[in-house]
Amino acid sequence: MPMTDTYDNRPIAVFDSGVGGISTLSELTTLMPNESYLYFGDSLHAPYGSRTEEEVRAFTDEHIGRLIEKGAKAVVIACNTATGAAVSYLREKYAGIPIIGMEPAIKPAVEAYPGGRVLVMATPVTLASGKFRALMGTYEKNAEVIPLPCPNLAQMVEAGVLEGEALDAYLAELFLPFRDRPADAVVLGCTHYPFVREAIEKAAGKAEIFDGGSGTAREVQHQLRLHGSLTDRTTAGEVIIDNSDPTEERLRFSEKLLEVGREKCKARMSESS
Ligand code: DGL
């Protein structure tokens, strides 16, 4: 079925409610540096995690529609919240264009700790979505899967709070109920959270952290291969970052996060090699 000898040099669209999806963009550009990317963050309307599912679907539909008009060959919804609210709708609307969403990495966490306690950090909208409930239903017979809503955490990252006392205090309170019954695994179910991974690690005690970003990047590569639409470029592709908050400050911050994200990917790869 797959056409492996065709190629497509159009960009891959990557969308998030704000700057969080840059963690996924970092994974994508590390795995497939010769592809080009059009990133759009909707920071003007972030956080999506405290909006209604209908609002999230409407914003996501509008922005992804525009990215497709600009010629994207595939779309990555680098946002768990927007995926839960809009992925099925968008796949139906844009049949033929691969649309890859995010999903909290519960599967690898449960497989690593069968019978263990797995906390899933995510926005309230993600945790209330039918998609998440179905995912949890699949795995809760194999482990104790506990949703942990983090209402303000993505917003802290949007505001540039990546470390410090306020963040540590927020996380300490979040993990307080688990001080006497610590988790084995903590799943980062929002693409903003990898940027505060170190602070989460501190608050989560001995729990192992699971992040779906690299798995999503591999899935994107797989889908492009299936569609015969990987690039044949032999040099680095272009990465364009845009935002509904088009201030210089937002764009600089986004570029800084891409650098931070790519450093983290590199460090992880050299650790595992
Ligand atoms: N980055 C988004 C996610 O993965 C959500 C952040 C927000 O609340 O806007 O769920």
Image (spheres, rainbow, N blue to C red):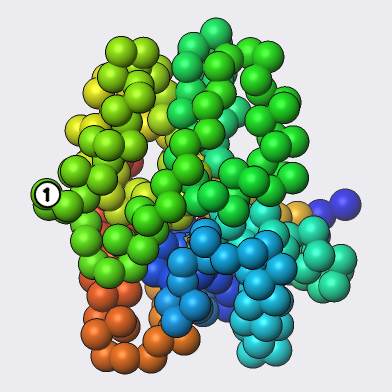
Residue name at image x 70 percent, y 89 percent: 69
Residue 137: give x, y in percent of width and height.
Answer: 72, 27
All told, the count of numbered labels is: 1
Residue 217 as seen in the image, left or right of residue 203: right
The residue singled out by tag 1 in the image is 165
Residue 134 versus residue 50: which sits nearer the camera?
50
Mark 1, ligand 1, within 8 Å: the answer is: no
Residue name at image x 56 percent, y 31 percent: 106
Residue 148: give x, y in percent of width and height.
Answer: 47, 36
Residue 148 as seen in the image, left or right of residue 259: right
Residue 136 versus residue 210: which sits nearer the camera?
136
Q: Is residue 136 above or below residue 96?
A: above
Residue 133: give x, y in percent of width and height.
Answer: 70, 37
Q: Is residue 183 visible?
A: yes
Q: Secondary structure at mark 1?
A: helix
Residue 95 as seen in the image, left or right of residue 136: right
